[in-house]
Image: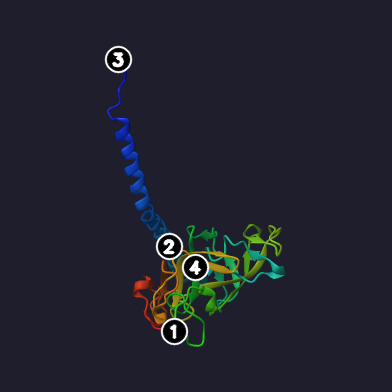
Amino acid sequence: MHRLTSPFTLVELMVTMVITSILFALFLPLFDTIVSGNSVSAGARLVGTNVGIARQLAQTSRNHVALVIPGDPTLPGGRRLDDDYKFAMVRLAYVDNDGTTFEGWLEDSKWTFLPTGALTLQVDDHVGIKKGTGGAKEYTNDPLEYPYPGPTITNIPYDDWLCVESDGTPANSNTTGTSRGITFRPTGKPDHASRYISIGESVYVGNTFIHKKPWQVSDPEKFKGGANQITIKINGFTSAVSYITPDRYPDDPTEEP
């Protein structure tokens, strides 16, 4: 009887395992960065695609079509969106001519969720995450420092499974509330000047954004806020959609990139 023998000695196998462990430890952060970056890029592409669909449908249907982008909306009776859904979903809807009142979801429309780890941090009239109002010319890590400039879309129906009661228990019925949004007129142009949707790597817990990679630079005028992010710009004149990374942000967020 012949005994089977391994082509490798035990020492060789142990050395291989040690080398593999070292390489894994070295490249795990890189892999994590790639995965994180992909979630933001994928989230930006998802939202950008829906922006394009909203624009096209507004033109073809001759209606006002909005991309509804909830943040932490105002809901009646103390209800709120579950934290898992805040700043994390979009949906296409018909709105009135003022772009402020929900009239109905597009046919076969459903809530679309951004990849895990990516959120719509700000929807406004500035690139990146702008700090405060009153002409502030700085970026920040807190998207809530700059209020949504509107117009707010009202009467948005939120399914019960998206919401919780004031005490944190699951909601037992559907409800209506407000939402951020970008509306396109029948011409295909946005209802206001150039609009920006900033998407970044973050989680939202207890009314607080936690960025995995806060932007840290010595010059406060260049403090971009949340290093891993992409801003989608919808041009107010041409309706063209472009994607802007922080390295292309102007030093002053009130300037056009």
Measured as percent of width and height from the top left, residue 11 is found at 31, 34
In front of the other: label 4 or label 3? 3
Q: Amino acid at mark 2?
A: Val
**Disc 3 versus disc 1: distance between alpha carbons?**
80 Å
Q: Residue 13 in the image: state x and y as whole percent.
A: 32, 35
Amino acid marked by disc 4: Thr
Distance of label 2 from label 1 (alpha carbons): 25 Å
Q: Amino acid at mark 3?
A: His
Calculate the distance from the C-alpha at mark 4 to the C-alpha at mark 3.
66 Å
Where is residue 90 drawn, in percent x and y? 52, 64
Q: What mark, if any, has residue 120 been given in the picture?
A: 4
Residues at marks 4 and 1, CA–CA distance in whole angstroms: 21 Å
Identify the element where label 1 is drawn.
loop
Residue found at x 64% / y 61%: 163
Disc 2 crowd, CA 10 A, few/some/many (<14, 14-19, 20+)? many
For residue 40, the mark is 2
Q: In the structure shown, which secondary structural element does the residue marked by tag 3 occupy?
A: loop
Q: Which residue is mark 3?
A: 2
Residue 237 appears anywhere in the view: no
**Neighbour tally class for label 3: few under 14, some 14-19, many 20 plus, Cα within 10 Å:** few
What whole-number distance in Å separates the C-alpha atoms at marks 4 and 2? 10 Å
Q: Residue at x 36, y 48 (%)?
A: 24
Name the quadrant of the N terminus: top left
Q: Can you say which quadrant of the picture contains the C terminus?
A: bottom left
Disc 2 or 1, which lies upstream in sequence? Answer: 2
Residue underneath mark 1: 137
